[in-house]
Image: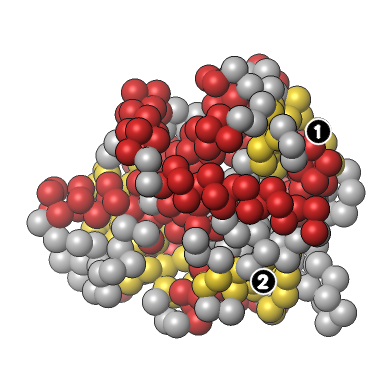
Amino acid sequence: MKTHYGIYGGQYVAETLMAPLRELEAAYEAAKKDVAFAREFKGILHDYVGRESPITYAKRLSEHLGGAMILLKREDLNHTGAHKVNNTIGQALLARRMGKKRLIAETGAGMHGVATATVAALFGMPCEVYMGAIDVERQAPNVERMKMLGATVHAVPEGSATLKDAMNEALRDWVTNCADTFYVIGTVAGPAPYPEMVRDFQSVIGVEARRQCLEKYGRLPDEAIACVGGGSNAMGLFAGFLDDPEVKLVGVEAGGKGVASGEHAASINGGRLGVLHGAKTMLLQTDDGNILDTYSVSAGLDYPGVGPEHCHLHDIGRAEYTVIDDDEAIAAFDAHCRFEGIIPALESSHALAEAIKRAPKLGRDKILLVNLSGRGDKDMENVMRYKASSANSSQV
């Protein structure tokens, strides 16, 4: 079991959670060796989620930019509209294997909450989702989807009322009810074994993309680009290329109003070493170790920490981590809609913005593979509010 990535990771939790984590470790180790578990996981991904997701050449956008070819790994085409469902199916199968009767989850943009509610309905399990009160307001369509699927949604008003605080409440619930409850963490953060487990369930993204690039283009991409909040979609993509040093791995953090402004969610580029939600990682904190409030136009990237494996990949130079601000993400959102007829999630728009920056500087023989981690239906109202606010500001 992988508990650390360099100096990062570990299990910095209350003593009451050590026994549940040990139980989870043992169950996951056994499941990884079970051919029947793998077969069922793969079968549900195929028959229910609709995998495998294709890679799509963003032809008009690429030609407009005049440089590298941009390919999209289409996780937006999954059932529920994002990559999150890959992981929730794996964890729900593990919960059933362990005899757990109830699922809980945290969510930011709501896609992990929707995916958890979806598998809970599929497996006939009660589900409760914790979501920051601010995110409940700005991601109202996903709140209604969760409720329609039978989940109870708890709005968390404490702290910054975003993803960090939702995760705090979910952990409190798990401490109290661990005998019959399985906590479905949505990203590659938290105490071991969650970072490894979530990465493994999401690795289907990178494994597929690697094979698809070879089959369709006869070569690997030059760069694999994905947005990073906690970092599950990025680790899922990177997992397929970690052993291919010729493929540059690029993680894109949320720059909000700019790292210098202090209003951002760029934990690697603007944070420091600390402990958050049971793991040692890079996070946004004060000199006294208090967690800072984060900001991003994208609710799913609005998290003050990042998965420990990302921190390690940064330290050893295997992956590069850049920053895209709100204006750049919104511009990429618009460009992708108008050139490709695909409405991307605001999270994914950060990765697209990075590709848009890089493509014109590269030759037409280069390939940039972007993980389109989700669709943007959930973000339409948020985008309109942002544009209205920006227009009003420019008139002042």
**Residue 214 visible:** yes
* Cβ atoms at labels 2 and 1 below 8 Å apart: no
> Could you tell me which secondary element the residue under label 1 belongs to?
strand
Residue 161 location (% of width, % of height): 82, 48
Residue at 69% in and 48% down: 20
How many marks the image carries: the answer is 2
Residue at 59% in and 17% down: 124
Residue at 33% in and 28% down: 43
Q: Is residue 109 left or right of residue 128?
A: left
Q: Is residue 141 left or right of residue 35?
A: right
The amino acid at mark 2 is Lys
Mark 2 vs mark 1, CA separation in Å: 27 Å
Instruction: Residue under label 2, please give it.
Output: 280
The amino acid at mark 1 is His
Residue 300 location (% of width, % of height): 62, 49
Q: Earlier in the sequence, mark 2 or mark 1?
A: 1
- Give the answer, above or below, for where 336 lies relative to 243: above
Mark 2: few, some, or many residues within 10 Å (few <14, many ≥20)? Answer: many
Mark 1: few, some, or many residues within 10 Å (few <14, many ≥20)? Answer: some
- Give the answer, above or below, for where 205 lies relative to 96: below
Front residue (pair 200, 257): 200
Q: Residue furthest left?
A: 218
> Could you tell me which secondary element the residue under label 2 belongs to?
strand
Residue 327 location (% of width, % of height): 59, 59
Nearer the viewer's eye, disc 2 or disc 1? 2
Quadrant housing the C terminus? bottom right
Instruction: Residue under label 1, please give it.
Output: 154
Front residue (pair 231, 250): 231
Q: Is residue 123 left or right of residue 156?
A: left
Front residue (pair 113, 37): 37
**Residue 58 visible:** no
Residue at 72% in and 75% down: 274
